Amino acid sequence: MTSAGAPTLIPGPLAAQEAGVAPATIRKWVQLGRLKPVGRAGRAQLFRLEDVFAAERTARRTR
Protein backbone atom coordinates (compact mmCIF):
# COMPACT_ATOMS: atom_id res chain seq x y z
CA MET A 1 0.00 0.00 0.00
CA THR A 2 1.32 3.48 -0.87
CA SER A 3 1.06 6.53 1.31
CA ALA A 4 -1.12 9.45 0.28
CA GLY A 5 0.48 11.45 -2.51
CA ALA A 6 3.21 8.90 -3.21
CA PRO A 7 3.54 7.98 -6.89
CA THR A 8 2.64 4.45 -7.93
CA LEU A 9 5.68 2.59 -9.23
CA ILE A 10 5.12 -0.11 -11.82
CA PRO A 11 7.45 -2.53 -13.64
CA GLY A 12 8.18 -2.16 -17.35
CA PRO A 13 5.79 -4.84 -18.67
CA LEU A 14 2.87 -3.33 -16.74
CA ALA A 15 3.91 0.16 -17.86
CA ALA A 16 3.78 -1.06 -21.46
CA GLN A 17 0.33 -2.55 -20.94
CA GLU A 18 -0.99 0.66 -19.37
CA ALA A 19 0.39 2.78 -22.23
CA GLY A 20 -0.84 0.36 -24.90
CA VAL A 21 2.63 -0.35 -26.29
CA ALA A 22 4.96 -3.36 -26.42
CA PRO A 23 7.48 -3.91 -23.61
CA ALA A 24 10.22 -3.38 -26.21
CA THR A 25 8.86 0.15 -26.71
CA ILE A 26 9.35 0.92 -23.03
CA ARG A 27 12.95 -0.33 -23.27
CA LYS A 28 13.49 1.80 -26.38
CA TRP A 29 12.13 4.92 -24.66
CA VAL A 30 14.62 4.30 -21.83
CA GLN A 31 17.48 3.91 -24.35
CA LEU A 32 16.45 7.14 -26.09
CA GLY A 33 16.19 9.02 -22.79
CA ARG A 34 12.45 9.64 -23.15
CA LEU A 35 11.64 7.63 -20.02
CA LYS A 36 13.68 7.22 -16.88
CA PRO A 37 13.28 4.39 -14.37
CA VAL A 38 12.94 5.61 -10.78
CA GLY A 39 13.89 2.38 -9.06
CA ARG A 40 14.31 -1.37 -9.25
CA ALA A 41 12.57 -4.41 -7.85
CA GLY A 42 15.03 -7.23 -8.36
CA ARG A 43 15.93 -7.07 -12.04
CA ALA A 44 12.79 -5.14 -13.04
CA GLN A 45 12.99 -1.43 -13.64
CA LEU A 46 10.23 0.58 -11.99
CA PHE A 47 8.53 3.60 -13.56
CA ARG A 48 6.09 6.25 -12.37
CA LEU A 49 2.85 5.84 -14.28
CA GLU A 50 2.64 9.57 -15.03
CA ASP A 51 6.13 9.44 -16.61
CA VAL A 52 5.05 6.53 -18.81
CA PHE A 53 1.99 8.45 -20.01
CA ALA A 54 4.11 11.56 -20.66
CA ALA A 55 6.55 9.52 -22.77
CA GLU A 56 3.64 7.99 -24.67
CA ARG A 57 2.17 11.44 -25.41
CA THR A 58 5.57 12.69 -26.59
CA ALA A 59 5.99 9.66 -28.86
CA ARG A 60 2.52 10.18 -30.31
CA ARG A 61 3.26 13.85 -31.08
CA THR A 62 6.56 13.07 -32.83
CA ARG A 63 5.10 10.52 -35.27
Image (cartoon, grey):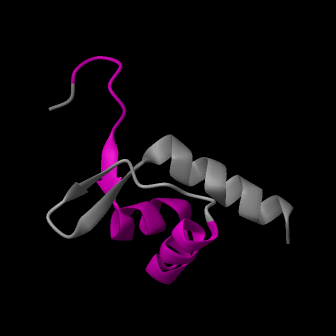
- Residue at screen point 53% across, 53% down: 52
- Would you say 29 lies left or right of 14 here? right
Query: Looking at the magenta stretch, what is its main secondary structure?
Result: helix
Residue depicted at x 72% and y 54%: 57
Residue 54 highlighted magenta (yes or no): no
Q: Tell me the quarter of the image containing the C terminus.
A: bottom right
Residue at image point 54% right, 46% down: 51
What x and y, as percent, mark residue 27?
48, 75
Q: Nearer the viewer, residue 31 or 7?
A: 31
x and y, in percent, of residue 34 in the image = 63, 59
Q: Residue at x 56, y 77 (%)?
A: 28
Quarter of the picture holding the N terminus:
top left
Choose top left, top right, bottom left or bottom right for residue 60: bottom right
Looking at this rendering, what residue extends furthest in the top direction? 4
* Number of numbered callouts drawn: 0
Image location (x, y in percent) of residue 42? 14, 64
Q: Which residues are magenta?
A: 3-32
Where is residue 53 drawn, in percent x and y?
Answer: 58, 50
Query: With respect to residue 50, does 28 lie above or below?
Result: below
